[in-house]
Image (cartoon, rainbow, N blue to C red):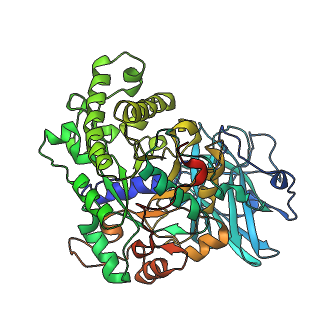
Amino acid sequence: MLNPTVNRIAFTIIMMCMILTGCGRATEAEPRKNVEMQAFKPEISLVYEAEEAKGTGKVAAVVNPKLKNFSGNSYVEGFEEDTDACIFQVEIPKEGFYDLNFVSAGMGGEKHNYVSVDKESIGTVYVEEAEFTDSVIERVYMTAGKHEITLSKYWGWISLDCLKITDSAPIDTSVYQITTPLCNPNASEEAKRLYSYLCDIYGKQFLSGQTCDAGPFGKEVQVIKKTTGKLPAIISMDFMDYTTSRVANGTEGRTTEYALAAWKNGHIVSFHWHWTVPEKYITGDWFSSFYKEHTNIDLNKIMNGQDEEGYGLLMQDMDVIAQQLTILRDNGVPVLFRPLHEASGGWFWWGAADAESYKKLYITMYEKFTKEYGLNNLIWVWNGQDARWYPGDEYVDIIGEDVYPGERVYTSQISKYLNAATNYSEEPKPVYMTENGCIFDPDLAIRDGAMWGMWSTWQGEFVAKGTAIHTLSEQYTEESMLIKAYEHEAVVTLDELPDLKSYPIREEWKDD
């Protein structure tokens, strides 16, 4: 997401935002549900009134309620400071999975807030309506007995009526069964072979991945090798330093070269692009001018035809990246390509406009790369993190989610997985954890049904400490968990990948 040299305080703040988008929210797309799920009726239904729970900081019951249709005697408000929270002491009758519904109302529009169970972060919930409505985080595993469930301030400014707890519906296993071909009808043989393998193992295994802009030679990869004795199956890199405005300031891109080496060594190659705006639009630090606060670019004007020069400059930048992808195509390298990531968060310039302009830009890039440049080696990974920003199934192969829940949090993030698996596309697509701070515990992910197709831990301090080449940072993932993940029987490492150059293409996806 961010270059590791960016100020680390700002880095942490922004990364914590990433878990918010799309988590526990109602979206415009209707979830895909089979008949069994539609007929599911919870056996357990518990209600805990917020005014009877423990409030910390400014959280307290409202004396003269103004909102209507609340349960109990009142509701609570006061989510204003970082220490403000509502803590429920609950008793669960039997071990299992539960949906936590924080019936609440937003003050002044969209609001996101943290949820923890027994002081362990499990995600966030979202509410937008000004009247009391459901705000659900799904499929939380709890043992029988007493638990502490906390809703704490992130954005804050909500009215909280109660917590409703019901047992969860079983997961619709069709989310793991991928039958649709690549969205590009002219996809190359290399892309089809890789995608066939990805779909064959999806729902059964996790691909290990690491973000490392130095490719297979980087310190993060070497730290993993030294610690676990294994190497990640996927290496993710950035096209950032090829961008026109960065080259004008002295950068020199090397990641295409590293990607060729990674593929030669047997790794799967993944790319994202921190797209620095054209120089005309830089208003602050050029190095960080993929962030909206360092630019004055207006994507709405560019995509609706009011800024024709800006459109031309963006096309020139796309040409530069297309040329790098062409090198990979000509060398037979299929690429998991994740452009315009995390748009709904609003911190990047491509997400600072409205969703329609973003989708136009994404589709324009897809059309340019596939039709003009014939980049049929790309497997398109969409990472907008909100259904309103989804460009359509015909432009997406894999759905990516970026998850930064804090330090040493090994939960499966099942609610975020299910949201991505059921609320974005009209047909099942693989869901990948395209960025993460902590590595999830594979045993918990299997137990919960959060069958992320991959993880790709972010670089820098998330793996390697300081500038030391072979020093493991345990700030986010402890050594024991890193070793457990890389040695787990359901985790695929480099040595366990098949020969992807000859992997059989699914019969139904072969050319006629």
Measuring 76% from the left and 79% from the top, which residue is drawn there?
145
Measuring 26% from the left and 27% from the top, which residue is drawn there?
313
> What is the residue that sits farthest to the left in this orientation?
250
In x, y percent, where is residue 198?
52, 59
Identify the image quadrant of the C terminus. Answer: top right
Looking at the image, how many numbered discs can be counted on the residues? 0
In x, y percent, where is residue 249?
13, 41
Q: Is residue 32 left or right of residue 182?
A: right
> What is the residue that sits farthest to the top in this orientation?
306
In x, y percent, where is residue 91?
78, 73
Looking at the picture, tell me which residue is in the foreground, 74 or 441. 441
In x, y percent, where is residue 76?
69, 52
Tell me if residue 350 comes above or below residue 142 in the rendering: above
Q: Is residue 282 left or right of residue 203?
A: left
Q: Quadrant of residue 497?
A: bottom left
Looking at the picture, tell me which residue is in the foreground, 313 or 512. 512
Measuring 61% from the left and 47% from the top, which residue is drawn there?
180
Observer able to see residue 511: yes
Observer able to see residue 464: no
Measuring 40% from the left and 43% from the top, which residue is drawn there?
339
Looking at the picture, tell me which residue is in the foreground, 23 or 494. 494
Tell me if residue 443 comes above or below residue 286 in the rendering: below
